[in-house]
Amino acid sequence: MKLSLRIFLMYFLLVGIGLFTFFSNAANQLRPIVRQSAENALIDTANLLAELVVRDLHNNQFNREQFTQAIARYQQRQLNASIWDVKKTTSDMRCYITDRQGRVIFHTDPDEIGKDYSRWLDVSKTLKGQYGARTTRIDPNDELTSVMHVAAPIFNNGDLFGVLTVVQPNASSVPFLEFARTQLLTQGSLILIFALAIGALLTYWLTHSVRLLSIYVQKVRQGERVTPPKLHERELAELAEATESMRRELEGKAYIENYVHTLTHEMKSPLAAIRGAAELLEEGGMEANARQKFLHNIVHSAHRMQDLIDRLLALAALENTNQLHNPEPLDLAQLVSAEIDTKRSRAQQKQLQLVFTAPPNIAEIKGDRFLLLQAISNLLDNALNFANSQSDILIHIEQQAEQLVLVIQNQGPWIPDYALPRIYERFYSLARAEGAGKSSGLGLSFVQEIAALHKGSIRLCNGGTLAQPWVEARLSIAR
């Protein structure tokens, strides 16, 4: 099944179930709402009629025949009411009156006069001072035959004289219920059609770019040379660009070839130095001072190779690590101070001053102590390597809302513009200050990986003037 069809079906099910549930609940609420409205009107009617007959009952002048004729005329009225789209042409309300003992003294059905209604809920509750109402079915098996009875007490100066009950069959509300159901069904159908149209457009919008990207990947898989599609969705566009980059790297094996080439190049110099010194020592007849010099060269080259291999292994391990395993709360100022103490002797050899400042009550960070010490050490080494003699290396910590930023600034030559985009590449290095040799080129790559693990970043930038240039490194760590 296609992705677009799956999305559309899922959307259809969600919208369909949601609309069905809503309109089903709304339809189920129609009947009680309509009956509640009808009962509310019957309460007003019953109380109004009770006030109309109270004086006659009190004076024993209640004219049953006259009241019966009035009710009959009301029932014979030809109504022409248009309630929304429902026409009402006949009256369907009935009523009866009982005395204070619950005996019927008036009824729209003359055969009921004189009967005892004291046990009916509408009468019995009203005589007890409660709200009296009941619904009774003429046919117990047919809900449409139910009749609503709402009673009102007949008072005069606080004395209860009787009860007046108005009666209305619930069948009279059926036209309104059918009208409301028809409206709900019509509007629900329109909403469903509109929702499905939106769902179709949404499905096409969501899957069109995915389809283009899928076609592109299939063509790449088949070995065709194609350009990535132009996608408007940022995430998919980034995925297309990443796929294109991966294709280029896989086709040309650029990554592996560059890695092997640079590693071979870096290892070639110390190996050549070791081999040359060993050959000269093997010839013999060399003075002690010269022998000592060549032995020193062998040891130095061996250390350089060992350092290169160690750094490379550490960097490879970091690149294969997705997250910190046991982060702990750390005081960044203490970590920096500890590393500065280990670098002071080297700084004194170059007549450099390490000046460190940090704000009071600095917040803690959560991270790996060993890795952060390694990152700080590499940045300090980098500053010491490229700083001019008899200058200051300024170190301070900036506290931001979400991060702490370690700033290390050394006075020295600017990083060339061509080198700025490449300084984080493996094995890429520049000549050190005052004619010193190049480094392994792995230090900043190492720092970049450590920063990423701590949800931060590393950035180097140039500053100052031509007369007094300086370079600043900014290591940010998430708090």
Image: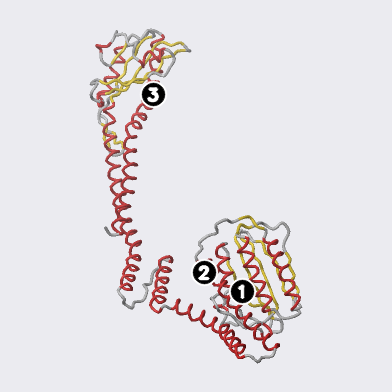
Front-lying residue, 208 or 216: 216
* Residue pointed to by mark 1: 460
Q: Are marks 2 and 3 in contact (CB under 8 Å)?
A: no
Classify 109 as above or below 307: above
Residue 306 vs 324, above or below: the answer is: below
Q: Which residue is mark 3?
A: 43
Tell me the amino acid under the disc marked 3.
Ile
Residue 208 location, quadrant: bottom left
Q: Look at mark 2 in the image and give the residue it sits on.
A: 316
The percent position of residue 458, horizontal first and vertical second, equals 59, 69
Query: Crowding near pointer 3: few (<14 within 10 Å), some, many (20+)?
Result: some
Horizontally, residue 245 falls left or right of residue 27, namely right
Image location (x, y in percent) of residue 462: 64, 78
Q: What residue is at 31 percent from the left and 37 percent from the top?
A: 27
> In the image, what residue occupies the spot 45% across and 13% down?
156
Of helix, strand and loop, which one carries label 1?
strand
**Secondary structure beneath label 2:** helix
Question: Mark 2 belongs to which amino acid?
Answer: Ala
Query: What percent of the width, then of the height, locates residue 276?
Result: 58, 88
Badge 1, how many Cα within 10 Å: few under 14, some, many 20+?
some
Q: Total marks drawn?
A: 3
Q: CA distance from mark 3 to mark 1?
A: 84 Å
Tag 2 and tag 1, C-beta contact below 8 Å: no
Q: Earlier in the sequence, mark 2 or mark 3?
A: 3
Residue nearest the observer in this picture, 358 or 62:
358
Q: Earlier in the sequence, mark 2 or mark 1?
A: 2
Quadrant where the N terminus sits is bottom left
